[in-house]
Every structure is written in structure tokens, then in C-alpha cells.
Amino acid sequence: MHRTDIRPIIDEKRPKIYIETYGCQMNVNDSEVILSILQDEGYALTENMDEADVILANTCSIRDNAEQRIWGRIDQFRLQKRKRQGVVIGIVGCMAERLKDKLLEGHEVDIVAGPDSYRSLPALLRAVTPDTPQINVLLSHEETYADISPVRMDRNGVSAFISIMRGCNNVCSYCVVPYTRGAERSRDPQTIVREAQQLFDCGYKEVTLLGQNVDSYYWKDASGADKDVNFAQLLEMVAKISPELRVRFSTSHPKDISDEVIYTMAMYGNICRHIHLPVQSGSSAMLEKMRRKYDREWYLERVRKIRSVIPDCGITTDVIAGFCGETAQDHADTLSLMEEVVFDSAFMFAYSERPGTLASRKYPDDIPYEVKTERLNEIIALQGRMSLKSNEKEIGRRLKVLVEGASKKNAEELCGRASSNKMCVFPSRGEKAGDYCEVEVVSVTSATLICKRID
């Protein structure tokens, strides 16, 4: 399915679909796949829930608070059904896969569809009646939606996500993803390059290649091993589309990121100098219990390799505070690793036990809430200092920035990201989203580089 109409169709005569998206970039891309499927079935997107014929929540199960938010939204969706007869409510994505029948019990949900069943949504919608809710949560070993061109729901037409693989084989002990998204499978590289080319032809300037673990991407070509494609080779294929197309990727796994990927990044100026490399803990004992398949020293060696080849590469991470059995020393190890690496930024969370995971079956969630919170606050405070320290190194540097739009604080300034993924703010000269600007960093905060223009 190849499109020239990659933006949502606006048609008052079509039935309306309203989509709320929760969770990661993968879910954003999934919502765009869902819209593509339903748009081909005659639906049109609306941003107004009050006029929607179909209300979908594309959900996340990574953390408990994400699920709790969605339960609250379901109560709001129910009000729409009471006000307007015939409104259909669907819960799709990871939460649908994990909770299945529970979502149909007493919550007036009409459709429950897992991440591998989006092609069935038109049939599920046709089959719904007030007394017959529909469910499809079958996981697949083949589904990648490679033939579906997502309908882009972003507002500025500058950056887009491309899913290169689905599922995960790592089974980290705390993580629910393998149970909600199934086994890992990679997508045909030619369809990925074609999608990226189409986006560039339509004016997009940046694509982000998405996977639960992009470094394990591997396409096995049926015609022979000499045509197999790994992640480094895929990166190069996408980068060659145009030097004006920026290429990002997420997420990397420390156990799998290869020297070949790092050297490929260094070879191409349009592959952004940024790697999101989740560490989760600085303690080797905790990493073993988490089943991360690397230890502290392996992680630090990968960081040293990245910085030896790409000295200006931004490195961001994820950190979990208070995992099962975490001692004060384990926590101290995490803080010391953060100080050694000096991450640009981090996503930081207190451990939230997810039902069905290995950790929930094997390890008691034995760190008191107050201790988790205290440790998380220490991690957040330290990262604030590290972010400022990292940004201060940028003062005086000249950067090429892709404009995202006007600054939220000052309409006469623009904002955009450098190759390192750091946010820059600088005076406007009338440029629009999607333009490139040359700037020099003059001052910083922990979150932003304050820049001047270079003539």
C-alpha cells in the first residue's frame, strides 16, 4: 500500500474516528498504522471526541500509572456513549493484550485489540453490537505492517517515526513488553527505505527508526546470506537517501550495540549524534537480577567506545530506582555510574511491578515506597546536575539545528534540536519548521541550549 496522501483525510461526510495515544514512540507509530487502515475503510480522523463515531485509546502497560490513567479515561469515554447512541469504544495496544477480558467487564468497551491485530479492526467494528463486544488479542510471529504506509498525525510535518521491527526477545525480568508485543521480528529493509524516501519526498526532514531493540534488527533474505541486512547496514541505506534527511534511532540495547553501528554513525553526517542507551542500574548485581545480559563494566566500555569514535555524541538513558532487593550500595553504584558517564538526560522511574513478568513471579517487591521515592529523588537531582554539566560543555560550539517551531516562551524565538538531540532556542529570522539554522551556544540551562545566530 503506497500513498501520496500521508496526512489525515478531512471529510465531514465520513464517519469520525478519535484516537488517544499513550506510551512510547512505538505507540505513536502504531496509531498512525491504525489510522491508515481505518482511513482506507472510509473513516476520517477527528481531534474532537464529541463528534467521534469511534473512540480508540492506544495503550501502554509498561508502568502501572499509565494503566491507571487509561482506566480513568474509559470513564470519560462511557459518558460519550450515554450522550450519543451508537458510539463505539475500543481499547487497543499493550494494555488490551495484557488485560484482555477484564476490559470488557463493566466498562462498556466494545473492542479490545492487541498490537498484532490492527488489520482486523474494520471487521471488529462491523461486528460490534450493543450486546456483542469484539476481541482479538492474538500475537503473531510474522506481522510487521510493512505494507501499510502510516498516516502521519504529527502537526509540523518535520519529523516522523518508522517502525523497523516489532516485539522483543530479551525478556528482562521487570518488563511486560515480550508478553504484550510478542516475539521479535524484523521488517523488510526495502519497505523501510521506501517509507523513508516517501517521507523525504513529502517534505519531512527527520526520521526515527524504532524498535524495542534496534541493534538486534536483522533481515534474513531468502535469496542468500550475502543479501542479509543488519542494523548498521540499514542505517546506511536510510542515510543515503539524502544528506538533508536526518536519521535517528531508538532504542539501543547495551548488550547489542556494535562497533559497526558506531562507525556507521561516524561515517554519515546526517545520522544524528545521539544514542539512547538504557542502563537501568549501575549495579552489576541488579543488572543480573534484571536479566539485562551485561554488567556495569560492559556498559561503561560501550560508552567509552562511543565517545572515542564520536566525541560529540549525546548519550541518554533510562534508570529504575528501587528494583527488587536493591541495597543502599546498589543505589550508590547507580549514582556513581551516572556521575562517571554524565548523561545528557534520562527517563527515571521508581520500580513498578508488572503482573506476569519474571520479577513478579520470582522476586518480592520488597523496597518500601518511601525508600524508592527517596532514591528516585536523589537520581533526579543528580541527573539535573549532570544535564547542566553536559550542556555547559556546549558553550561556544557551533551547531546545525533543525527548526521545530516557535519557542513556547517567546514568539520571536525558534526552537529545534541539534544532532545530539539537545534542545536549542535562538532568535528567529522568519524561518519555518523544517528549515536548518546555524547557531552558536552562548549559555545553557539543564534542559536547553541558549544560542545566537551565525551569519
Image (tube, grey):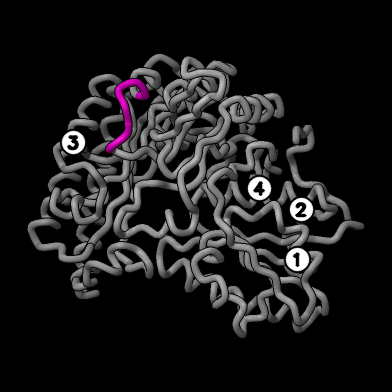
Q: On the rendered image, what quadrant is the N terminus found in? A: top right
Q: Whole-percent x and y of residue 329?
A: 7, 57
Q: Whole-percent x and y of residue 443?
A: 34, 35
User: Is residue 249 covered in magenta?
Assistant: no
Residues at badges 3 and 2 in contact (C-beta under 8 Å)? no
Task: Please give the residue where the numbered disc 2 appears in the rendered image.
Answer: 38
Q: Nearer the N terminus, badge 1 or badge 3?
A: 1
Label 2: how many residues lie within 10 Å, few (<14), some (14-19) or many (20+)? many
Task: Please give the residue where the numbered disc 3 appears in the rendered image.
Answer: 298
Residues at badges 3 and 4 in contact (C-beta under 8 Å)? no
The amino acid type, in three-letter code, at marker 2 is: Leu
Residue at point 17% right, 51% down? Answer: 334
Residue at point 23% right, 25% down? Answer: 305
User: In the displayed image of the protein, which residue is found farthest to the left?
Assistant: 329
- Answer with the quarter of the image where residue 436 lies: top right
Q: Which residues are magenta?
A: 255-261
Q: Secondary structure at mark 1?
A: strand
Q: Nearer the N terminus, badge 1 or badge 2?
A: 2
Q: Secondary structure at mark 4?
A: helix
Report, in whole angstroms, how far the alpha carbon at label 4 lies from the one at label 1. Answer: 15 Å
Task: Please give the residue where the numbered disc 1 appears in the rendered image.
Answer: 54
Residues at badges 1 and 2 in contact (C-beta under 8 Å)? yes
Task: Please give the residue where the numbered disc 4 appears in the rendered image.
Answer: 32
**Please, is residue 149 above or below residue 430 in the view?**
below
Q: Whole-percent x and y of residue 253?
A: 33, 39
Report, in whole angstroms, how far the alpha carbon at label 1 lies from the one at label 2. Answer: 10 Å
Label 3: how many residues lie within 10 Å, few (<14), some (14-19) or many (20+)? some
